[in-house]
Every structure is written in C-alpha cells, then in structure tokens.
Amino acid sequence: MKIALERDVRIVCLDVLMDMSKKSDKRPDLVAIAKRAKELRGKITPKAVCTDLINRPDALAAGERILIRCQDIGILDDKYRLTEDGIRAAKEESVFIPERGVYRIWCTKDSLVSQKFLRYEQKNDGPLWAHFSRDSPKKAKGSPKKKGKIDKTPKWVRDLSGKELQVYGTDEAVRIENVEDKCRTVADAEASLA
C-alpha cells in the first residue's frame, strides 16, 4: 500500500537589491590565475602573470590589473595569495562571478522544504525604489509611480547572505553575498516551482 500526503507550501516572492555570485566555468583566464598561483605555493605576482600567462614580460601594469580583478571576485587576497575560493577555482575549474542588481527571488520558510531560497530572476527594469512616471497628469513631474510597497526585507531572507545555494530543481549554484534591508513584496507573482 502506498500513501501520499500533500499540502500547499507558502512561497514568498520579493524584489530585492542584492549582491549574488553565480558559478561560471566560462572564465578560463581567472581559473588559469588560480592554477598558476597554486603551482607557486599559493601566491602569485604581476610579473608571474606577465611572463607565465600572457607572455608579455614588460606589461606589469596589465598583470597588476588582472590580479586586482582576481581580488575583486575573491580568489586572491590583498597580498595576491589564494583564498579558499581561489583554491576551489583551481580544483573545480570554475569561479563565482559577483553581480549587484535587483533580483526577483522566490523563498519559503516552510520546514518541509530543505532550503529557503528556491529560485531567482534578474530584473532589468530599473532601480528597485526609483520608478518614476513622467506621463501621469495627476502627479507632479518626477513623483514616484506606485509599483508596490517598499518593505523591510525579512530577517530570514537577509540571513541567506554568505550562503552558497543550489537553485531549486537545477544544477545551478549561486552564492548570496549580501541582501539589502529593503524589498518589494510581489503580490501577483507566479509563485510556483513547476
């Protein structure tokens, strides 16, 4: 005999300004830096980048800029030593690339769902709380166009900061670096995992 229990799971949909890193295997240049640093006992120099990787021994400024970019994404520290992310990049041949933006995220607090973060999509329709309507004759020029109430981001969503998560139902890995304090609750979103 087989018994199947079913219940609805409450899903919250929010538009949030946050920093999210997406795992990418399409940056062999950054992986090469991490691998070379690992070969050099965990530390790399601009000169090593220029001579070993880009074959331009006199382009130290270019080597320096490349290493600064590696610091920005977190695979090197401020002394050009590999971080945990850098060691992982060398091993897995992929890096987390950070992006700041407005994301629509679907989350749940349901105890039967193993992770709170379910899915996301990046919004490209302007800043979260700066939607303006110049066409409306009833409002003064530059006054806000109401597109949903700005709320305080729930603590359980802000607590996702610093966590690496798998997007529900996919192999995609993301890391939420920082979630801002304000969000917009999306009331009419298709809050479904199907």
Image (cartoon, grey):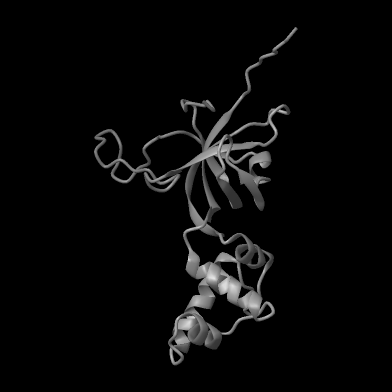
Q: Position of residue 44 (x, y in %)?
A: 61, 81
User: Is 110 or 42 nearer to us in this picture?
Assistant: 42
Q: On the rendered image, what quadrant is the N terminus found in? A: top right
Please give the name of the residue rendered at 38% of the width and 41% of the height, measured from the top-left corner: 144
Residue 8, compared with residue 79, is above or below; it is: above
* Picture quadrant where residue 118 is located: top right
Residue 190, compared with residue 71, is above or below; it is: above
Q: Position of residue 167 (x, y in %)?
A: 57, 40
Please give the name of the residue rendered at 55% of the width and 67% of the height, measured from the top-left corner: 31
Residue 176 seen in the figure? yes
Please give the name of the residue rendered at 54% of the width and 28% of the height, measured from the top-left corner: 193
Q: Residue furthest bottom?
A: 58
Q: How many marks?
A: 0
Q: Residue furthest top?
A: 1
User: Is 48 or 105 nearer to us in this picture?
Assistant: 48
Q: Position of residue 15 (x, y in %)?
A: 50, 40
The answer to whether 187 appears left or right of 9 in the picture is left
Residue 180 seen in the figure? no
Q: Position of residue 33 (x, y in %)?
A: 55, 74
The answer to whether 180 appears left or right of 132 in the picture is right
